[in-house]
Amino acid sequence: MSQTTLLPVLTQPTLVGAVPGFGPSTGGNVVLLIGTNLGGATSVTFGGTPATVVSQDPFGFLITVVAPPHAVGEVPVVVTTPAGASSPANYTYYGPVPSPPSVLLLTPATGPTTGGTPFTIVGANLSGASVTFGGVPAVAVNDVGGVILTGVTPAGAAGNVAVVVTTPAGSATVAGGYTYVAPALPTVVSISPVSGPVAGGTPIVIIGTNLTGASVTIGGASVTGVVVDPTGTVLLGIAPPGTAGNAAVVVTTPAGSATVAGGYTYV
């Protein structure tokens, strides 16, 4: 009479889940797999990429592995034993977590209320940043290597305002903010010559202060060809035609107006 040897019946593994169910795309983190009949696992894969098996419990309930690198996204985790492959458990790879921006320096820290002042911000993690001055977006913002921001200030009311740098990772406020300074009113000391023909065309020179950006009228008619020197103290122009007699001369800048004492006389 022959003796029959019974072979053990292998049961297909069942994978319940992975703890944690997420990790960095660089891999290298420890993941605990939970299920049944996991004993004797021959391989563990994350999205088809083999993981490193660190340990298995003798009862087939737990396997500890090191996750391999993988592209960002959700992937199936599969445990294979001599009995076959388990149903997959989900695991999510995430990309590198960006660091929030930090700001070390804003220069200049002051500028005119009219805006238009080029500025530079030095800091870290500034890539893709936007900048606001008192809640108003700066224009032409550009980052250089994620450590320098350049741009142009918007217009704002006189006084100190918060400057906020914002990236997809968060925001940072510039210490001390930015101070808008109202432009100084123009003043006029003299006009030369003080008279000219009614036909106009006379070159005139006005001496004063804070004349940058000025326009000039004589008797309400605009002086043409206005040029102001870089110091804002000398203004050149061509007198318009006028009526014989004395006419008011008014110099106007974004900050306000000033009237030339004695005016200009058409002869």
Image (tube, rainbow, N blue to C red):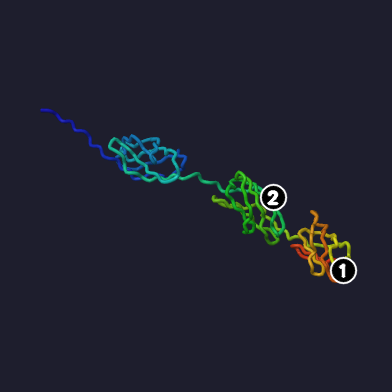
Quadrant of the snapshot with the N terminus? top left
User: Neighbour class for label 2 at 10 Å: few (<14), some, many (≥20)?
Assistant: few
Q: Amino acid at mark 1?
A: Tyr
Residue at 64%, 59% in the rendered image: 134
Q: Amino acid at mark 2?
A: Thr
Q: Position of residue 189 (x, y in %)?
A: 86, 62
Q: Position of residue 130 (x, y in %)?
A: 60, 53
Residue at 84%, 71% in the rendered image: 243
Q: Position of residue 129 (x, y in %)?
A: 59, 50
Q: Which mark is residue 120?
A: none
Residue 91 appears left or right of 142 = left
State the CA–CA distance, disc 2 to disc 1: 49 Å
Q: Position of residue 159 (x, y in %)?
A: 70, 60
Asked if 155 appears above or below 31 in the picture, the reply is below
Q: Residue furthest top?
A: 1
Residue 65: image quadrant is top left
Quadrant of the snapshot with the C terminus? bottom right
Q: Tag 1 or tag 2, which sits nearer the N-term? A: 2
Element class at badge 2: strand
Q: Residue furthest left?
A: 1
Q: Residue furthest front?
A: 199
The residue that mark 1 highlights is: 266
Q: Which mark is residue 107?
A: 2
Residue 78 appears left or right of 254 = left
